[in-house]
Amino acid sequence: MHVGFVSQNIYPHDYETRLTKAARMLLRAGHRVTVFSKGTSDEMRDGVAIRRLNANTLPINPRWFFWLAKILARESVDVAIVRDLRLAPATILAGRRAGIPVVMDSGENHPAHVAALGKQRLGHYIIRNTRLVAALERWCVRRADEVWVVAEANRRRLAAMARVGITIRLIRNVPDLDAVPGSRPQRAARGTRMRLVYLGILDNLRGLDMLLQAVAKTKDVELVLVGDGSERAGLESQARALGIDARVRFRGWVSGPARFQELWAADVGVIPHRVNHLSQTTEPNKLFDYMSCELPVLSTPLDPVRAVLEEERCGTIADFAPDAWAAAIVALAADPAERAAMGARGRRAVLERYNWERESRQLLAAIAELA
């Protein structure tokens, strides 16, 4: 089969790890893969053909429909998979023109996402209008041939609006075991401080301001933030104002094996996200990355995360408040044996259940059914 992925990013991109894992798996299974993405020039990379269009990815841009309708037919694509919402309308319509099925791979609760981001500029009153985004999402879900989600809560939400007979398929964002080191590397001596690690985007959705306040209420605890984003400068200023800048390191954006090296060097992985409709309908990728590196997980009360932590006994939950998090951090620091046990249980769960080798069977089955 010839499988085409449509991405709003300039592929390859660090945000498209799911696409990269899926493409690698499809190639191993003998399929042909092409990525249609934003950008200026075509290329081949690791067996994947990349076709690019230099155009704005807003849903109202007709250039994407005409380009996709032409190129999907010209390259004899059998199934198109569109990553998230912006290019979903154009891909669905182009797929109909080309006579092929289209999968909407929905990574999140889109109306809740724009609501959580808020409106900082005039244009946000259009592109972050929750009613418009909800209407667009509903239109796409009802017209795609299949929808994929990463969390059960979002599957239930979309199933309520989908037309009768459409499959809303759960395919989790879990680690590719080929990318995870086989065992913990030797860790350099760094004193008695317990190290917390955060992996991901630094923005106002992730609760990192609360995390810094919690760290300031503890002693002998350090924090490494592996990522980047719009709030980095503000968080750096907050760390200085709290007097903890010597205990907080901003690592910047890290990809590939170096990301896992930072995780292996830590003691606890943290998910301090704000609790809202967005965070209650998704499973953050970092959850399984932490588990794969034997890190116990400390999270705010996010239902999808709580379900995994309680089932696997690999972490703990603390309310979204500096005092609650400081108490949870102190408790973890006082019990290294329990931290090690939680970390071991989490890694075992990834090796046995929460891994891409297992999860990708769903994707292969979907491709076979659609084609």
Image (cartoon, grey):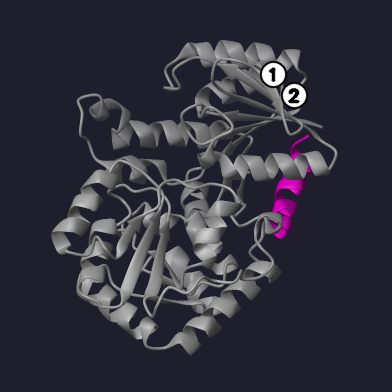
User: In the figure, is residue 192 to the left or right of 7?
Assistant: left
Q: Which mark is residue 77?
A: 2
Mark 1: few, some, or many residues within 10 Å (few <14, many ≥20)? Answer: many
Q: Secondary structure at mark 2?
A: loop
Q: Residue at x 65, y 22 (%)?
A: 95
Name the amino acid, label 1. Answer: Leu
**Prevalent SS, magenta region:** helix
Q: Which mark is residue 202?
A: none
Mark 2: few, some, or many residues within 10 Å (few <14, many ≥20)? Answer: many
208 is higher (above) or lower (below) than 113:
below
Q: Which residues are magenta?
A: 357-371
Q: Residue at x 51, y 11 (%)?
A: 63
Q: Secondary structure at mark 1?
A: helix
270 and 19: which is toward the camera: 270
Decide if residue 147 is in sight here: no
Residue 252 in percent (x, y) is at 40, 47
User: In the figure, is residue 332 to the left or right of 242?
Assistant: right
Q: Quadrant of the N terminus?
A: top right
Check if residue 368 falls in the magenta segment: yes
Name the amino acid, label 2. Answer: Val
As measured in the structure, the alpha-carbon distance from the residue carrying label 2 to the one carrying label 1 is: 5 Å
Residue 141 in percent (x, y) is at 52, 37
**Callout 2 touching callout 1 (CB < 8 Å):** yes
72 is higher (above) or lower (below) than 220:
above
- What residue did someone put label 1 on? 72
Q: Residue furthest left?
A: 241
